[in-house]
């Protein structure tokens, strides 16, 4: 696929391990305005659908659902 860059193992492996072992993750989050912050999340749903993958999580800081998409 043109423009698609597969996420590296440094990202995918810890995410999958935390998800399957139901561990909390601390991530760097970038919002719609491109502002960056650290978040403590509980991954609830993972979806891999070329050319993107998605993470739906509970954000413990904001006490709300957050979703992220990684794609080209």
Image (spheres, rainbow, N blue to C red):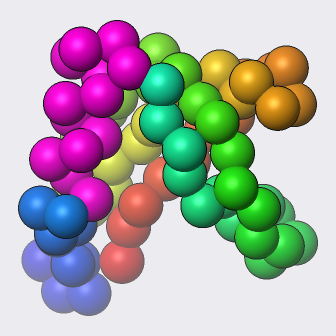
Residue 53 in view (yes/no): yes
Quarter of the image where the N terminus is located? bottom left
Q: What's the residue at 47%, 16% (across, down)?
A: 44
| Depicted 58 relative to depicted 70: above or below | above
| Depicted 42 relative to depicted 25: above or below | above
Q: Quadrant of residue 15?
A: top left
Q: Classify residue 23 as left or right of residue 40.
A: left
| Depicted 5 relative to depicted 58: above or below | below
Residue 55, position as x, y percentages in the image: 45, 37
Residue 71, position as x, y percentages in the image: 38, 67
Residue 48, position as x, y percentages in the image: 24, 40
Residue 49 in view (yes/no): no
Q: Quadrant of residue 36?
A: bottom right
Residue 66 sits inside the magenta stretch: no
| Depicted 28 relative to depicted 35: above or below | above
Q: Classify residue 56 as left or right of residue 1.
A: right
Name the foreground residue: 54 vs 40: 40
Q: Quadrant of residue 9?
A: bottom left
Q: What's the residue at 48%, 36% (across, down)?
A: 25
Name the foreground residue: 71 vs 43: 43
Give the magenta range: 11-23
Quarter of the image where the C terminus is located? bottom left
Q: Classify residue 16 as left or right of residue 54.
A: left
What main secondary structure does the magenta stretch of the protein show?
helix
Q: Classify residue 33 as left or right of residue 23.
A: right
Q: What's the residue at 23%, 77% (across, down)?
A: 4
Residue 15 sits inside the magenta stretch: yes
Name the foreground residue: 7 vs 13: 13
């Amino acid at each position: 696929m043109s423009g698609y860059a597969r996420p590296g193992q440094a990202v995918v492996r810890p995410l999958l391990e935390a998800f399957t072992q139901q561990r909390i993750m601390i991530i760097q989050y970038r919002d719609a305005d491109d502002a960056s912050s650290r978040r403590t999340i509980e991954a609830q749903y993972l979806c891999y659908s070329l050319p993107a993958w998605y993470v739906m999580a509970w954000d413990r800081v904001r006490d709300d659902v957050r979703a992220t998409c990684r794609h080209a």
